[in-house]
Amino acid sequence: MRGQPGFFDVEDRLQRLSDLGDQLDAFARVVDFEMFRPELEAALGYSDRSRGGRPPFDPVMMFKILVIQASNNLSDDRAEFLINDRLSFMRFLGLGLADKAPDAKTIWIFRERLTKAGAIEGLFARFDAAVREAGYIPMSGQIVDASLIAAPKQRNSDGEKADIKAGRVPQAWQGHPAKLR
């Protein structure tokens, strides 16, 4: 560890990300996300909060999470983790290091409410149009949501392994077509 972080360390890191071509930074520069607020608020139909309860996350920020998910092919759980992990995601969403980020269930509920209201396709069509109008081509699949799966164990004998390496089919496999796969 180099010691205590400096006052400008995070800002320097964010500038470096921008210099390297942060896709989300480009989105933030070319798309006015506030244009989605009226449609989001109408589709979500949040109450006036006169009955109390915890206030919802900002709908524009939540829509930006859906943009992150769509452009990076992320599940809700993976999005929750990466929002808490990545400075570029936090900057795009307007979150500081100490701010609370929505969890996977909150992201799912938000998307479901937009889907049931029939608004999600229109919102993304408007987003894609805004990106194209700025001279960019919207792409997806830049990050893969990885899952680890155990590979099947090989149970070949040393003699079978030697035959396989030599390009021969082991004698014991002749009557077992499944082994040839």
Image (cartoon, helix red, strand yellow):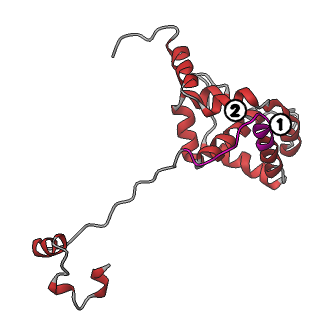
Quick check: is 136 in the magenta stretch?
yes
What residue is drawn where x is 77% and y is 36%? Answer: 59
Residue 36: image tag: 1
Look at the image and tell me in which quarter the N terminus lies: top left
Q: Can residue 54 be seen in this snapshot? A: no
Residue lying at the far top in this picture: please name it. Answer: 7
- Per the picture, the main secondary structure of the magenta-coloured stretch is loop
Residue 83 rendering spot, x and y as whole percentages: 57, 35
Tell me: 181 left or right of 70: left
**Left or right of residue 12, residue 130 in this image:** right
- The mark closer to the camera, 1 or 2, is 2
Task: Give the residue pinned by disc 2.
Answer: 27
Please tell me in which quadrant of the rendered image residue 21 appears. top right
Element carrying mark 1: helix
Q: For the residue marked with disc 2, what is the amino acid?
A: Phe
Pick the residue in front: 76 or 175: 175
Cα distance, mark 1 to mark 2?
14 Å
SS label for mark 2 = helix
Where's residue 159, x and y in %? 10, 75
Q: In this view of the protein, which residue sits in the foreground, 104 or 169?
A: 169
Estimate the x, y position of residue 57 in percent, counting from the top left: 72, 34
Residue 57 vs 107, above or below: the answer is above
Do residues under tags 1 and 2 come within 8 Å of each other at their CB atoms?
Answer: no
Q: Residue at x 65, y 46 (%)?
A: 139
Q: What residue lies at 75% left-to-right and 32% top-to-bottom?
A: 58
Callout 1 amino acid: Phe
Question: Which numbered marker is on residue 59?
Answer: none
The picture places residue 78, in percent across and down from the top left corner, at 54, 45
In the rendered image, the quadrant that contains the C terminus is: bottom left
Question: What's the residue at 52%, 17% (across, down)?
Answer: 10
Q: Provide the residue span drawn in magenta.
A: 128-142
Q: Tell me, yes or no, whether the highlighted magenta stretch contains residue 175.
A: no
